[in-house]
Amino acid sequence: MISADELRQLVVDAPDRVRIVDCRWMLGKPGAGAEAYRAGHLPGAIHLDLDADLTEPNGYGAPGRHPLPSPAHFADRLGRAGIGDEHVVVAYDDVGGWIAARLWWMLDNLGHHEVAVLDGGIDAWTRADGAPALTTDVPSWPPAELHLAGEWHGVISREDLKARLGSVVLLDARAAPRYRGETEPIDPVAGHIPTALNAPVDGNLADGRFRSPAELAARFRALGADGANGPVVTSCGSGTSALHHAIAMRLAGLPDPILYVGSYSDWSRSGEPVATGPDSGEPPAV
């Protein structure tokens, strides 16, 4: 994580090393994030879109809504946008960090550890004393060389997860009404993956910013997701907000969770059994 004050100082101290990325995006409203970016963004920021830049339709996690691109394609895309090995990347959004977390996780997972999420997002920046005003200017960064690892790690496929249900702690990061099956705005069947525990991402936040490491550790311990009960797998609708838990667990000093990339969109589109209501449900018969 990085605070607005820390980011402002970083830009002053090392302007050529910093690459700020606006990750704003809205479920069910293609192009809304880019529109918000054009209306005003942090000085020096570019926009990367979850659908267009951080997803590959037939990548790892298909037929879920946001499969991962191949690492090579991802590195090429960011390199063409001007992000290279020497850069510190700071991602932000306007929803508490769960979209920016996707870019953070992708870079960190592939070995580029000079990456952070702006705690509090664009609101924290606009409220910070002395922070430069938002701008509509679009930077033009020269292409850069970005060398990343050749494959994703810490991920799990639908078939592997299905075989391990009941032996892993599966966290569902979606809001409670979607978990319970009371509403489903985009995926074909309402409900949740059997055995999944509901852990909405807003529980990681207080006033729009991440809770303290001690508070986060207590939250995941209460969920049985501190590593003592077996590996932790995070999921959500499409492998994005689940990564908010990856940041929270890192901040809490807990083992990194495994990501079910396809998440509920992959599970529900593949005809797998689902559970509804407040209970986690039993694993399906093999």
Image: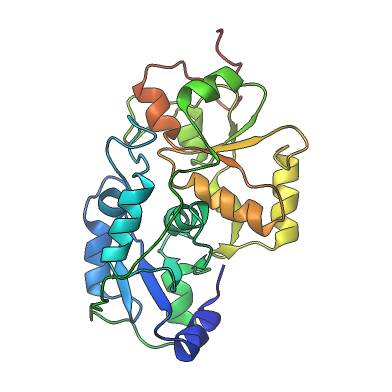
Q: Can I make out residue 183 in this image?
A: no
Q: Can I make out residue 143 in this image?
A: yes
Q: Where in the figure is residue 159, as x and y percent of width and height?
A: 48, 21
Residue 224's place in the image compared with 195, above or below, is below
Which residue is more in the foreground, 169 or 115?
115
- Residue sticking out furthest to the top: 285
Q: Where in the figure is residue 4, as x and y percent of width and height?
A: 51, 78
Which residue is at a point 58% across and 55% down the rendered structure image? 247
Which quadrant holds residue 85? bottom left
Is residue 170 shown left or right of residue 130?
Answer: right
Q: In which quarter of the image is the N terminus?
A: bottom right
- The mark total stands at 0
Q: In which quarter of the image is the C terminus?
A: top right
Which residue is at a point 45% across and 43% down the rendered structure image? 151
Q: Where in the figure is residue 47, as x and y percent of width and height?
A: 29, 66
Which residue is more in the foreground, 227 or 113?
113
Protein image colouring: rainbow
Which residue is more in the foreground, 53 or 126?
53
Which residue is at a point 47% across and 29% down the rendered structure image? 157
Q: Where in the figure is residue 138, as x and y percent of width and height?
A: 23, 77
Is residue 83 shown left or right of residue 228?
Answer: left
